């Protein structure tokens, strides 16, 4: 008897149906620190010629003033996505002087946390709120964790795929409800298999000693060379307990089994006071230390390897947008910056991720319990710290399996999905990308984490010396990249427009920040409409920052 998976594959392989798989949309958000030529953190502000970090559509900052974030538009052509990211890097380098973009996830040499300046978004209430939110992150988790860089991958299926898929599944609910339920199924399967991403793409097996001065991690790191520390089989220290994690969020009751459950759990985390964060307080000597004392200051603070997302309307929070319109796309957040790719991610990674995420969506995805979520995180943690140990065992439901055995089974299913996508797109890109990644399962030395350690050893370099040498090579390569004057002109126009938007916003303020803050966070209830706060937020699908325009209160 054929399995449900085999039946699904046969149905999707029919010529009149397979074409619905063409047109996957993806967008990328990539972070990079600005550094000096000696691998220390840059001390300059966000370069003025690049425009406003608050309102620019593609060049902004994340936590720190020196942590740049580059954002591509959503596109159905993966090649164009990489080209867009390349153009942003090329343009930025025109305005960095002697500074470099750090091409790794773990930070450059940072002697004290005082060297890390919070991102400055100007004097508007929204700009101040963004900076105070970051001060809250500093007080809650420390600055060092916040200057760890990553790549976020935004993914959605083609619009015309959904009616076909719903019909194949025999589903009768409203189409958007079906789409939301399907994306949640993708997310649940991603959690179950999330360990595979740091194994294949983890590129942070070592860290500079300056980072450890400010870490509370108990990982048994070993000394390597003069100022480097590592774990021999680590893949991604960024995703380990040493890196981007929050123990305060480990006990959050956020379910991915239905959209109402997810929304309820997210709202509860935003509105429940936290005893640890209460000790910090909201204000100290008249200065805001955080936005509030809740477990999450705002919804964006939720740390997860993948999140459901939707384009926000003016004034909407994510939970409200999801409740009103459902899930539109997913955001994968567990990717290390690839040091060996000029843009931090390459075309082959994109094609693999498309196969993997499509598989997670197509594969049956039963509900996932809190214990199963914890097991998934334990598997991920094992792989981040010792994933290249060929004897490593993981827990698949209640069955123990070696990483290699489980990965081979996954790749067997992925191969079927790659064939479907190649047929739909009349090419071989997906299968070629899959074959390349599969080689890493049998040969861990092919992983980027192993390559990093090998290059350090062969070139007799500390980790930050190696990353600095790579940064210089990337800059040279970008300078040699074809770059039209039209593109440069377009970036300049956008920079000027973003500065004007910020100026207009600041000049139109009608509330003192204390009043703005009280109305927004004062009673732990859902925030009032920003129209009644004197401003209007307009956030695009693939951006964290907002274009903010004046608005009146009706």
Image (spheres, rainbow, N blue to C red):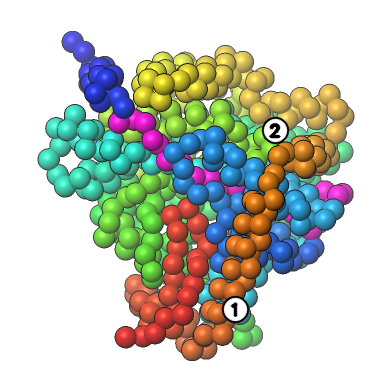
Gap in angstroms between the C-alphas marked 2 and 1 = 39 Å
Give the residues drawn in magenta, as a range: 20-42
SS assignment at label 1: helix
Quarter occupied by the C terminus = bottom left
Q: Is 364 left, or right, of 114 in this rendering?
A: left
SS assignment at label 2: loop
Most distant residue in the left direction:
172
Quadrant of the rendered structure where residue 157 is?
A: top left
Q: Is 179 left, or right, of 372 in this rendering?
A: left
Along the viewing direction, whichever of 309 and 291 lies nearer the viewer:
309
Q: Mark 2 or mark 1: which comes first in sequence?
A: 2
Quarter occupied by the N terminus = top left
Residue named by callout 2? 340
- Please tell me how crowded label 2 is: few (under 14), some (14-19), or many (20+) other residues with Cα within 10 Å: many
Of badges 2 and 1, the one in the foreground is 1
Q: Is residue 26 visible?
A: yes
Residue named by callout 1? 503
Q: Is 512 left, or right, of 421 in this rendering?
A: right
Image position of 284 with respect to 476: above or below: below
Name the residue rendered at 44%, 71% in the picture.
Answer: 537
**The stretch drawn in magenta includes residue 40:** yes
Most distant residue in the top direction:
1
Q: Position of residue 65 (x, y in %)?
A: 69, 63
């Amino acid at each position: 008897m054929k399995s449900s998976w085999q039946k699904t594959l046969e149905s999707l392989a029919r010529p009149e149906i397979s074409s619905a798989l063409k047109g996957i949309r993806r967008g990328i958000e990539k972070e990079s620190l600005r550094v000096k030529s000696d691998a220390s953190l840059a001390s300059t502000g966000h370069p003025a010629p690049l425009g406003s970090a608050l309102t620019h559509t593609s060049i902004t900052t994340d936590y720190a003033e020196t942590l740049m974030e580059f954002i591509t538009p959503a596109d159905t052509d993966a090649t164009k996505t990489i080209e867009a990211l390349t153009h942003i890097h090329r343009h930025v380098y025109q305005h960095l002087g002697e500074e470099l973009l750090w091409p790794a996830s773990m930070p450059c040499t940072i002697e004290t946390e005082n060297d890390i300046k919070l991102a400055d978004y100007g004097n508007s209430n929204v700009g101040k709120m963004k900076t105070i939110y970051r001060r809250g992150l500093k007080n809650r988790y420390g600055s060092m964790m916040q200057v760890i860089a990553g790549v976020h991958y935004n993914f959605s299926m083609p619009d015309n795929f959904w009616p076909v898929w719903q019909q194949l599944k025999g589903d009768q609910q409203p189409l958007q409800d079906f789409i939301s339920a399907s994306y949640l199924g993708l997310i649940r399967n991603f959690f179950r298999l999330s360990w595979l991403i740091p194994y294949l793409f983890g590129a942070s097996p070592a860290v500079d000693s300056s980072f450890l001065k400010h870490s509370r991690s108990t990982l048994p790191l070993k000394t390597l060379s003069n100022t480097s520390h590592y774990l021999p089989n680590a893949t991604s220290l960024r995703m380990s307990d040493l890196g981007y994690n929050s123990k305060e969020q480990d006990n959050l009751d956020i379910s991915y089994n239905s959209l109402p459950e997810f929304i309820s759990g997210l709202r509860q985390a935003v509105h429940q006071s936290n005893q640890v964060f209460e000790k910090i307080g909201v204000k100290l000597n008249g200065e805001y230390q955080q936005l509030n004392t809740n477990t999450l200051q705002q919804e964006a603070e939720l740390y997860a390897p993948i999140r459901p997302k939707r384009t926000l309307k003016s004034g909407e929070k994510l939970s409200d947008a999801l409740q009103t319109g459902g899930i539109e796309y997913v955001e994968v957040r567990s990717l290390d910056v690839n040091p060996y790719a000029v843009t931090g991610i390459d075309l082959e990674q994109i094609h693999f991720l498309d196969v993997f995420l499509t598989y997670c969506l197509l594969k049956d995805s039963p509900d996932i319990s809190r214990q199963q979520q914890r097991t998934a995180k334990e598997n991920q943690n094992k792989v981040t710290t010792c994933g290249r140990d060929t004897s490593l065992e993981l827990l698949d439901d209640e069955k123990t399996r070696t990483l290699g055995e489980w990965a081979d089974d996954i790749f067997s299913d992925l191969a079927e999905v790659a064939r479907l996508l190649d047929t739909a797109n009349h090419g071989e890109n997906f299968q070629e990308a899959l074959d390349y990644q599969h080689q890493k399962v049998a040969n861990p030395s092919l992983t980027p984490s192993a390559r990093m350690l090998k290059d350090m050893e062969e070139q007799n370099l500390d980790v930050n010396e190696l990353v600095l040498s790579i940064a210089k090579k990337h800059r040279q390569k970008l300078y040699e990249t074809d770059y039209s004057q039209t593109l440069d002109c377009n970036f300049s126009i956008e920079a000027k427009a973003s500065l004007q938007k910020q100026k207009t916003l600041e000049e139109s303020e009608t509330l003192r920040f204390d009043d703005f803050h009280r109305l927004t966070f004062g009673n732990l209830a859902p925030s009032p409409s920003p129209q009644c706060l004197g401003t209007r937020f307009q956030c695009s699908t693939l951006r964290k920052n907002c274009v903010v325009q004046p608005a009146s209160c009706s």
